[in-house]
Image: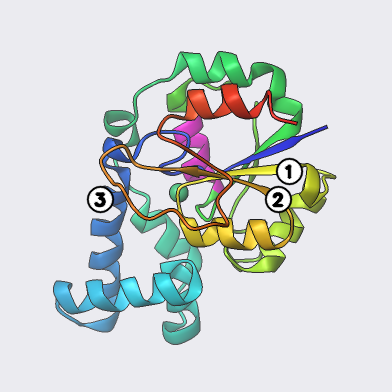
Amino acid sequence: MQTFFFDLDNTLYPHSAGVTEALEEKMNAYVAQITQLSIPAATTLRQGYFQQYGTTLRGLQIHHNVDSELYLAAVHDIPIEELVIPNGTLCTLLHSWLGQSAVFTNSPREHAVRVLSRLGFAEHALRIIDIRAVDFIPKPHLQAYQRALDTMNATAKNAVLFEDTLVNLKTAKEIGMRTVYMQAADKQVHVPNYVDAVYNDIVSAIQVESKEK
Ligand SMILES: [Mg+2]
């Protein structure tokens, strides 16, 4: 039996929703505030942390001793309901897979709950493995994947990860998961060989992948 792991942001809704831009603006302001850097300098620093550690927060924890909860609350204070469009087709499609699916995100649970609710999922319909559930050690670090697999009682070889961040798929492939890259429709990038399949749309991705064995 397959287990589906879904990244949340830019995977269960499209990149074009603009959530990333809204989050990044908040993150840049937060980093600028705690470091006293200008916004452009803070942006560069934040991007470096994201690349090095998988999340901005991990870099801030390591180098600036930030209060994780204050940070998470501040940066996720964005108008999800204005940005994300409900997706009834997705909810219906995933309905029969709910027991074998989990959201596996570097975001905090409350952000995921808000997005899922806006998409149209019933409360608690989908299991959520969030940044706290992995003790703030995010994807692409191996232990996050191990925690996710354990949570779902799944093995890597029967698991599929749907994800828009390529480096997070790399770890998934290394441990034997099937890797599904959710590519932004307006962003054509070179697809590395650790990617098994590429889709622009989550509904098509699930339709095809649920038939794969
Ligand atoms: Mg994502």
Spatial CA distance of label 3 from label 2 is 29 Å
Q: Earlier in the sequence, mark 3 or mark 2?
A: 3
Regarding mark 2 in the picture, which secondary structure is present there?
A: loop
1 and 2 marks in contact (CB < 8 Å):
yes
The residue wearing badge 2 is: 177
Q: Is residue 113 visible?
A: yes
Regarding mark 1 in the picture, which secondary structure is present there?
A: strand
39 versus 86 height, above or below: below
Q: Give the residues in magenta.
A: 109-116
Spatial CA distance of label 1 from label 2 is 5 Å
Return the residue nearer the eye: 94 or 176.
Answer: 176
Q: Is the shortest distance between ligand 1 and the CB of mark 1 under 8 Å?
A: no
Spatial CA distance of label 1 from label 3 is 30 Å
Q: In the picture, residue 160 is in which quadrant?
A: top right
As drawn, which residue projects farthest toward the front?
193
Image x and y of residue 178, in percent: 67, 46
Q: Earlier in the sequence, mark 1 or mark 2?
A: 1
Regarding mark 3 in the picture, which secondary structure is present there?
A: helix
